[in-house]
Amino acid sequence: MKLVEFFAPEEVDLDLDAESKEDALKELVGLLSVNEKSDELFKLLKKRENLGSTGIGKGVAIPHCRSLVVDRLRVVYGRKSGGLDFEAVDGKPVHHLFLIVAPPVEISNQYLPVLGKIAQFCKTPKNLARLDEIESTDQFFKVLEQADV
């Protein structure tokens, strides 16, 4: 199982418009195309963020939750070049956002392993530097394919 397998081109946005944590969550949820259920998913993510920020530091946030809004594990990536305040553990702006949503009962049980793989991917400064430089979704997929996760 490679990390790249969990992303779809239409679920990658290299130029988020968001100026706040809430706006970023809404924008990421929008990439999932769950339409009328977007508000429900946004509220779940916000509730999760109230427990503690998913801003893990080094410019990365991994908001995540389980929800009946999706029928399978879904992963979204968004980049905010200028960064935004996500109340990250290191207090620094977040540039890279990986949203993970899975149904409450997931037969493949990949939710936590994918969360771990993304965290592992983001621990490597070279991977984040490459994400800073990419200009297309194709380049995003190449970065993921070349990473050791």
Image (cartoon, rainbow, N blue to C red):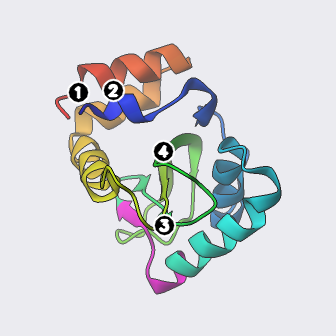
* Amino acid type of the residue that numbered disc 2 sits on in the rendered structure: Leu
Tag 3–tag 2 contact (CB < 8 Å): no
Name the residue carrying label 4: 75
SS class, disc 2: helix
SS class, disc 4: strand
Going from N to C along the chain, the mark reached first, 1 or 3, is: 3
The Cα–Cα distance between marks 4 and 3, rounded to whole angstroms, is 11 Å
Name the residue carrying label 2: 144
Q: Of the numbered discs in the image, which one, if any, rests on residue 44? A: none
Whether residue 95 appears in magenta in the rendering, the answer is no
- Farthest-out residue, front: 107
Tag 2–tag 4 contact (CB < 8 Å): no
Name the residue carrying label 3: 65
Going from N to C along the chain, the mark reached first, 2 or 4, is: 4
Whether residue 55 appears in magenta in the rendering, the answer is yes
The Cα–Cα distance between marks 3 and 2, rounded to whole angstroms, is 22 Å
At a point 65% along the width and 34% down the height, the residue shown is: 15
Corner quadrant of residue 141 = top left
Residue range in magenta is 49-56
Residue 135 visible at all: no
x then y, percent, for residue 3: 31, 35
Name the residue carrying label 1: 147
The answer to whether 134 is drawn above or below residue 44 in the figure is above
